[in-house]
Amino acid sequence: MRVSDLISRIVSVMRGEQGAYRRAMNTKDGKRVFSSIRTFCEVDRTPIVPGDDISTGVLIGKQEVWKMIRKNLGPDFEEEQLRRMASAQVKDLVHEAQNISEGVDR
């Protein structure tokens, strides 16, 4: 097998994985999962816990998961898109809560 063929196969596999991540994250359930992962990974805080190496290590590990997801979504999948997805999840939850409360009020 030629090197160019090998590189072509690797690129094809990577695009397939990237596409899978994007397709998964662009569904209603995907947005819910995305929001949950973002919260769990605590991406908006420093991973440093002064005086607690174990907690620091745990937070670094969690944030590495987020970095992997970001990498697999691709370089043009920007933070703003990610924030919009998280925001859309919140709006969906508020809407669901309103529907539930309207059903309870009847």
Image (cartoon, rainbow, N blue to C red):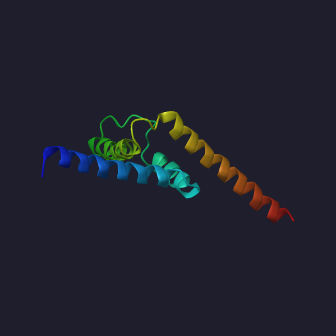
Residue 43 percent across, percent down from the top left:
43, 39
- Above or below, 97 relative to 59: below
Q: How many marks?
A: 0
Q: Residue at x 80, y 65 (%)?
A: 104
* Residue at the extreme right: 106
Residue 54 percent across, percent down from the top left:
28, 46
Q: Residue at x 13, y 48 (%)?
A: 2
Position of 43 compared to 87: left or right?
left
Between 21 and 89, the one lying in front of the other is 21
Quadrant assignment for the C terminus: bottom right
Between 15 and 44, the one lying in front of the other is 15
Q: Residue at x 78, y 59 (%)?
A: 101
- Above or below, 26 relative to 77: below
Residue 105 percent across, percent down from the top left:
85, 62
Q: Residue at x 70, y 57 (%)?
A: 96
Q: Quadrant of residue 86?
A: top right
Q: Quadrant of residue 29?
A: bottom right
